[in-house]
Image (cartoon, grey):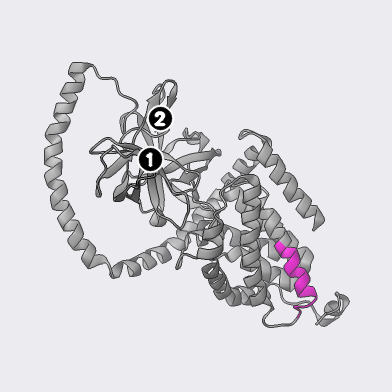
């Protein structure tokens, strides 16, 4: 027992102190690649049971959801026809003014769809492991979105054939977001797993209303740029409040991506040559 | 030797199931920990040395598969495997409530130990969420898993014949 505890402590210490390219990290990456087929097999076996549970769970809400979606569909069809002309006008204006933007979606990115292989057991981490890695061109800090394009997280540790994705609900995650309507900026955080997701650092003078859509801000400051390109949909403001003593607004957010039911994700890798 | 091999295969399969299937299951905010329950069962059936080895091996697989800090789960699960094994060799021998009591206690200790280690390493350690909001659900879910897991583990690793039991440490109460 003493030997195993000492080995564990040695692993912990060396892993914690070495760089991400160190020996133990490489060994772990190789090990993760070896375990990948077993995880894929386990996921395939579990899939029918997950589908059945999802189907049973969805029976209650299907009718209400159907009505809601029909209304939303009508609204979105009307908006889409309006955005068609706006987009064309935007393209013309960009051409006239020789506008130089940052990397934009989806033009400057390669989308790598991948399955979620595993996630740490227990309640500690808001992270998952996906089945693409260094061999597919993935690097640390690549943005990750859901299959319908909503922001999910960012890659952290990248192995040869797998990558760890830190979800935006992780305590250590922070995303610069902007109100799609007013352009007001803030930082999306989830300080406590039991509490709501908030956007803070939004000045009181900025305009943010309930129901406003929030997208990634995609800022650039000198040589520094946000890891997220501008315009990835993140969430909807569900509550806006401010107090006399707090210099900033407090905005509660409902995420667009349903992180609990995701089975696959898309890792966005910058095309070669794009800065 | 054969017992060790059987236990290794069992722990390997359970660790893979844990990270790819069970870690994703959330019931009333709780997450069942199949690996922890299996290690408790192996430790109770085969003693402290096998318990510690199962814990170390299971933890190593979890840390490798999830690309998390290597050694963190191994350390906690080794200590848990050893401690439950000692309990099984002494006080808990032949007691029907031993698996349930062990699972309830180690779920709490595992959460507490995980929080302490993560705090020391500077990683997120949401104590309120872990200890107040989800611990009871975690314990309840693990207790639900205890009986089926213990029965399966007992079939795979049947208790040693009485002569071997007598050679072990004396029962304390």
Q: Chain of mark 1?
A: A
User: In front: A57, or A94?
Assistant: A94
Q: Residue at x 56, y 39 (%)?
A: A159
Residue lying farthest to the front in this orientation: A244
Question: What residue is pinned by disc 2?
Answer: A270
> Is residue A185 shown to the viewer in this render?
yes
Up the image or down, B140 lies above or below B128; here it is below
Labels in figure, total:
2
Q: Judge from the rendering whether residue A5 lies leftward or rightward of residue A121; answer left or right.
A: right
Up the image or down, B125 lies above or below B100; here it is above
Residue A79, image quadrant:
top left
Image quadrant occupied by the N terminus of chain B: bottom right
Q: Judge from the rendering whether residue B55 lies leftward or rightward of residue A20; answer left or right.
A: right
- Region of the chain picked out in magenta, as a range: B80-93
Foreground mark, 2 or 1? 1
The reply to whether the magenta stretch includes residue A17 is no
Residue B143 screen position, x and y as percent: 58, 74
User: In front: A221, or A44?
Assistant: A221
Residue A191 screen position, x and y as percent: 47, 49
Q: Main secondary structure of the magenta part?
A: helix
Question: What residue is pinned by disc 1?
Answer: A247
């Amino acid at each position: 027992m003493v030997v195993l505890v000492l080995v564990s402590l040695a692993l912990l210490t060396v892993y914690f102190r070495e760089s991400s390219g160190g020996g133990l990290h490489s060994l772990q990456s190789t090990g993760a690649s070896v375990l990948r087929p077993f995880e894929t097999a386990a996921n395939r076996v579990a899939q029918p049971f997950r589908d059945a549970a999802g189907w049973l769970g969805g029976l209650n809400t299907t009718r209400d959801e159907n009505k809601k979606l029909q209304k939303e569909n009508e609204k979105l069809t009307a908006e889409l026809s309006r955005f068609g002309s706006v987009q064309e006008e935007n393209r013309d204006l960009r051409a006239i003014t020789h506008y130089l933007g940052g990397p934009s979606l989806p033009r400057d990115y390669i989308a790598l769809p991948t399955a979620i292989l595993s996630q740490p057991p227990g309640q500690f981490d808001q992270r998952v492991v996906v089945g693409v890695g260094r061999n597919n061109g993935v690097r640390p800090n690549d943005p990750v979105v859901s299959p319908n394009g909503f922001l999910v997280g960012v890659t952290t540790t990248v192995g040869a054939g797998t990558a760890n994705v830190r979800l935006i609900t992780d305590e250590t995650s922070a995303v610069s977001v902007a109100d799609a309507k007013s352009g007001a900026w803030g930082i999306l955080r989830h300080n406590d797993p039991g509490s709501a997701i908030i956007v803070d650092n939004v000045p009181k003078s900025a305009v943010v209303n309930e129901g406003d859509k929030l997208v990634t801000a995609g800022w650039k400051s000198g040589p520094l740029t946000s890891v997220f390109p501008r315009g990835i949909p993140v969430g909807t403001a569900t509550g806006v409040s401010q107090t006399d003593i707090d210099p900033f607004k407090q905005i509660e957010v409902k995420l667009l991506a349903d992180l609990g039911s995701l089975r696959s994700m898309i890792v966005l890798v910058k095309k070669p040559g794009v800065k | 030797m054969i017992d060790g091999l059987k236990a290794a295969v069992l722990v390997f399969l359970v660790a893979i199931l844990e990270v790819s299937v069970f870690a994703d299951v959330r019931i009333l905010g709780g997450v069942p920990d199949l690996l922890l329950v299996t290690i408790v069962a192996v430790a109770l059936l085969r003693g402290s040395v096998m318990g510690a080895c199962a814990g170390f091996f299971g933890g190593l697989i979890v840390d490798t598969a999830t690309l998390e800090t290597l050694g963190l789960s191994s350390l906690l699960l080794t200590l848990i495997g050893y401690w439950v094994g000692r309990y099984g060799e002494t006080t808990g021998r032949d007691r029907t409530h031993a698996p349930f009591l062990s699972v309830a206690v180690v779920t709490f200790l595992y959460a507490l130990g995980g929080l302490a280690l993560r705090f020391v390493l500077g990683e997120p350690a949401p104590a309120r969420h872990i200890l107040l909001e989800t611990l009871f659900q975690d314990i309840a879910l693990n207790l639900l898993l205890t009986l089926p897991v213990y029965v399966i583990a007992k079939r795979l690793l049947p208790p040693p014949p009485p002569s071997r039991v007598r050679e072990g440490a004396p029962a304390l109460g």
